[in-house]
Amino acid sequence: MELDPESQRQLIDEVEVKLGPYEPNNADFEEAYERLQAFDRGEMSAISAEESMAAIRKLIADAKQNRP
């Protein structure tokens, strides 16, 4: 997210070329709907974007430390 918008677009384009574009299918929408319903029933919780990014950064840092 620290990249300027043009660099972000270039990165996205490069990833799409490498991995191919993502096309959601019915199963994706069904799963999203089921998760939203579970969240509304209180069966799932959410975390903030900041908490999510902190957890991801920790996973990456831990993985780098445990590399041979």
Image (tube, grey):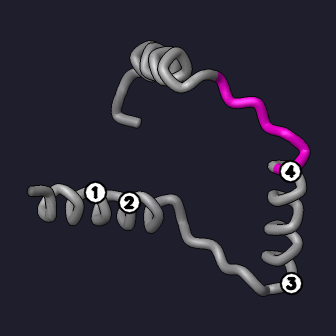
Which amino acid, by three-letter code, is at mark 2?
Ile
Q: Tell me whether the residue at label 2 lies in contact with that at label 3, contact meaning CB atoms closer than 8 angstroms.
A: no
Question: Mark 1 Cα within 10 Å, few/some/many (few <14, many 20+)?
Answer: few
Tag 4 or tag 3, which sits nearer the N-term? Answer: 4
Tag 2 or tag 4, which sits nearer the N-term? Answer: 4
* Residue 1 vertical placement versus 3 (above, below): below
Q: Which residue is mark 1?
A: 60
Magenta stretch, residue numbers: 21-27
Q: x%, y% of residue 14?
A: 45, 16
Q: Which residue is mark 4?
A: 27
Q: Secondary structure at mark 1?
A: helix
Residue 5 visible, this angle: no
Could you say which is closer to the camera, residue 34 or residue 47?
34
Report the Cα–Cα distance between label 1 and label 2. Answer: 6 Å
Report the Cα–Cα distance between label 1 and label 3. Answer: 32 Å
Q: Is residue 14 left or right of residue 63?
A: right
Q: Tell me whether the residue at label 1 lies in contact with that at label 2, contact meaning CB atoms closer than 8 angstroms.
A: yes
Could you say which is closer to the camera, residue 32 or residue 25?
25
